[in-house]
Image (spheres, rainbow, N blue to C red):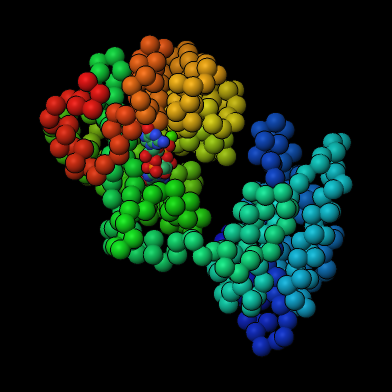
């Protein structure tokens, strides 16, 4: 079931329940670690596991409860006619307990675990979107903590940025491109920059992307944000390349847009509008994003690579990608996760990890970039162990695109010479 069908179904229940003195529960259930299970046992087995899980859920709930599968390893359950929210919480505990016994898949016996988020109507929201968002929020808490089932707590959403603000900010063009230069370690020269989004909200200052990209991804606004980011970055790239035609630009691509049908044509048309050749653009995708759906990522990235774009595997080393898969990805670059780079000076093991990634990358004919370079010693270490490029506060902090581009035309490297 897709999201709009789900919203319609839930809205139907809300309309039916209105005026009655009952509580309607919305329970989101996510099977844990199914991604790893699929990587090991394949699609058919993980599909069978999801089906067995759905049957198990249905068995422990009431016949009036409606269980629907909404994603590969996610279910929503509508629980009508509850006395109060405590009954919804009890239903959650019952589902958690049901997974204490293993599921049988073919001849295999598999112990699955679930995380559950619950919201209730009317207490936690008057419409389907709000109820779902709050159940999702509770589900996120359940995944982060040891509690397997969590009922939404009133007020726990306060620090979150409202959807409407972000939507408005994108439409009203209040997002800004910051650029962070990338240094070639052999030539000791800036060869390009990574585009990083900033949100300049009047009266609230600059909001960092970690605060709004996840929201954009959850709410679907990421499509609009990606369209903005492609066009705004390429506009600056086109100006910068007028000064130095050798410069290349890196753009972060969220995995949530991988499945979008027109993503390739969107990228290609932005390149042609701004007159930037595909070879001058690197799309950064995180290691974990690739592993979420390796087959789809592979197809999309191959296509983009065939069109001439470069592909960087971002946050490399932080995730759990399988080297067997990695071999097939049409990447041109590995970008070492900054956690390892930041630790290089005081942790010999981080140096070993960085060194291994550089060797691995070079064996696979990939360029290797280190990000998070915060001091001169780390920069020299990286140069010494053969890293190709570097990025970090020591070289240049991310800054408004126009500011960085103005510097590119001037002295090559004031910060680190
Ligand atoms: P990322 O792609 O890993 O970006 C690098 C992050 O490291 C940036 O954070 C940058 O400011 C920070 N950084 C750079 N040098 C240093 C350093 O020396 N030390 C430390 N501690 N940090 C350093 P930022 O700009 O807050 O971006 C966070 C994340 O948000 C990015 O991580 C990226 O995943 C995402 N993001 C940013 N802009 C966009 C965008 O336009 N679209 C998408 N889809 N994601 C974006
Ligand atoms: Ca990046
Ligand atoms: Ca990164």
Residue 302: quadrant of the picture: top left
Left or right: 188 in relation to 391:
left
Q: Is residue 116 above or below residue 405?
A: below
Q: Which x, y percent locates residue 382?
A: 39, 17
Residue 116 left/right relative to 177: right
Residue found at x 14% / y 26%: 411
- Res. 4 image quadrant: bottom right
Location of residue 265 by image quarter: top left
Compared to residue 276, the image places residue 151 above or below, namely below
Relative image position of residue 120 (x, y in whole percent) = 67, 72
Q: Please, which residue is most extreme toward the bottom here?
A: 19
- Tell which of 220 and 339 is nearer to you: 339
Name above or below for residue 230 compared with residue 411: below
Q: Quadrant of the N terminus?
A: bottom right
- Please tell me which residue is depicted at 74% across the width and 39% down the height of the picture: 45
The foreground one among 258 and 395 is: 395
Residue at 37 percent across and 27 percent down: it is 373
Task: Name the side, left or right, on which 54 lies relative to 11.
Answer: right
Residue positioned most to the front: 346
Residue 39: percent from left, percent from top: 66, 33
Q: Position of residue 349 (x, y in %)?
A: 55, 19
Q: How many marks?
A: 0
Please indicate whether residue 224 sits to the left or right of residue 121 in the image. left
């Amino acid at each position: 079931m897709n999201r709009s069908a789900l919203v319609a179904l839930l809205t139907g229940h809300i309309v039916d329940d209105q005026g009655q003195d009952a509580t309607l529960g919305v329970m989101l259930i996510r099977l844990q670690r199914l991604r790893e299970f699929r990587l090991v046992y394949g699609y058919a087995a993980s599909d069978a596991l999801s089906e067995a899980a759905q049957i198990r859920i249905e068995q422990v709930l009431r016949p009036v409860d409606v269980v629907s599968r909404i994603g590969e390893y996610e279910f929503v359950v509508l629980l009508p006619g509850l006395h109060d929210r405590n009954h919804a919480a009890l239903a959650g505990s019952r589902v958690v307990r049901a997974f204490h016994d293993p599921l049988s898949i073919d001849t295999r016996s598999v112990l699955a675990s679930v995380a559950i988020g619950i919201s209730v109507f009317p207490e936690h929201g008057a419409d389907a979107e709000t109820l779902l968002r709050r159940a999702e929020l509770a589900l996120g808490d359940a995944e982060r903590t040891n509690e397997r089932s969590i009922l939404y707590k009133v007020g726990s959403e306060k620090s979150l940025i409202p959807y409407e603000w972000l939507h408005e900010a994108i439409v009203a063009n209040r997002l800004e491109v910051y650029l962070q230069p990338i240094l070639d370690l052999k030539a000791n020269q800036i060869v390009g920059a990574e585009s990083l989004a900033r949100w300049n909200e009047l009266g609230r200052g600059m909001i960092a992307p970690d605060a709004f990209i996840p929201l954009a991804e959850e709410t679907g606004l990421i499509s609009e944000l990606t369209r903005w980011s492609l066009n705004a970055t390429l506009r600056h790239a086109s100006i910068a390349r007028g000064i130095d035609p050798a410069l290349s630009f890196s753009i972060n691509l969220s995995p949530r847009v991988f499945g979008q049908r027109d993503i390739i044509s969107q990228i290609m048309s932005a390149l042609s509008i701004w007159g930037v050749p595909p070879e001058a653009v690197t799309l950064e995708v995180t290691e974990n994003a690739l592993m979420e759906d390796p087959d789809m990522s592979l197809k999309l990235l191959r296509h983009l690579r065939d069109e001439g774009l470069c592909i960087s595997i971002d946050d490399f080393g932080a995730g759990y990608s399988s080297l067997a898969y990695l071999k097939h990805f049409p990447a041109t670059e590995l970008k070492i996760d900054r956690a390892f780079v930041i630790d290089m000076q005081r942790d010999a093991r981080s140096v070993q990890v960085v060194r291994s990634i550089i060797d691995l990358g070079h064996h696979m004919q990939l360029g290797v970039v280190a990000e998070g370079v915060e001091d001169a010693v780390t920069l020299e270490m990286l140069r010494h162990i053969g890293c190709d490029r570097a990025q970090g506060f020591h070289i240049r902090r991310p800054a408004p695109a126009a500011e960085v581009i103005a510097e590119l035309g001037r002295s090559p490297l004031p910060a680190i010479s």
